[in-house]
Image (spheres, rainbow, N blue to C red):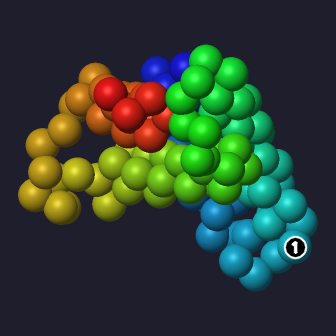
């Protein structure tokens, strides 16, 4: 799931950044950006509920956790795929390592391991 998100975001980085910049001043673009965000949040919230059905993450609020993880993904991806890039942070990270990092954060948040 994270790989698909990363690849789609990477292929459309220009559009995603443009929408984010325009969303700051134009309601129409803010609505588009929030639709993108809600899509990601719905996926994460569903995964929280699945984990809870399996006895994990009982203390997690599905929507709050979804917002936190989805927005973390959005910012991380925007920085590391966009022009500001990891090299400007003096960080060497491949797509594979970025995907692995995001996946691990998501998994550990839900399952603790």
111 left or right of 42 in image: left
Relative to 52, 9 lies left or right: left
Q: Is residue 18 left or right of residue 108?
A: right
Residue closest to the eye, 108 or 101: 108
Name the spot of residue 112 as percent of width and height, x first: 38, 34
For mark 1, does the 10 Å Cα neighbourhood hold few (<14), some (14 to 19), or many (20 or more) residues? few
x, y percentage for residue 68? 56, 55
Q: Look at 55% across and 20% down and name the residue there.
A: 1
Occupied quadrant, residue 100 = top left
Under circle 1, the secondary element is helix
Q: How many marks?
A: 1
Q: Nearer the viewer, residue 29 or 4?
A: 4
**Picture residue at 66% right of the left edge, 55% below the top:** 64
The quarter in which the C terminus is drawn is: top left
Say which of 64 and 32 sits in front. 64
Q: Residue at x 70, y 38 (%)?
A: 45
The residue where tag 1 is placed is 27
**Visible residue check, residue 2:** yes
Question: Where does the image place residue 104, in percent across and percent down from the top left?
Answer: 34, 31
Residue 83 visible, this angle: no
- The percent coordinates of residue 93 (x first, y second) are 19, 38
Give the residue displayed 50% in from the left and 34% down from the top.
110
Seen from the viewer's position, the closer of residues 87 and 36 is 36
């Amino acid at each position: 799931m994270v790989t698909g998100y990363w690849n789609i975001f990477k292929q459309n980085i220009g559009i995603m950044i443009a929408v984010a910049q325009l969303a700051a001043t134009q309601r129409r673009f803010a609505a588009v950006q929030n639709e993108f965000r809600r899509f990601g949040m719905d996926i994460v919230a569903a995964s929280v509920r699945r984990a809870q059905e399996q006895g994990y993450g009982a203390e997690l609020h599905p929507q709050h956790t979804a917002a936190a993880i989805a927005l973390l993904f959005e910012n991380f991806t925007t920085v590391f795929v966009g022009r500001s890039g990891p090299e400007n942070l003096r960080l060497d990270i491949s797509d594979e390592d970025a995907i692995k990092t995001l996946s691990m954060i998501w998994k550990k948040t839900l399952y603790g391991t």
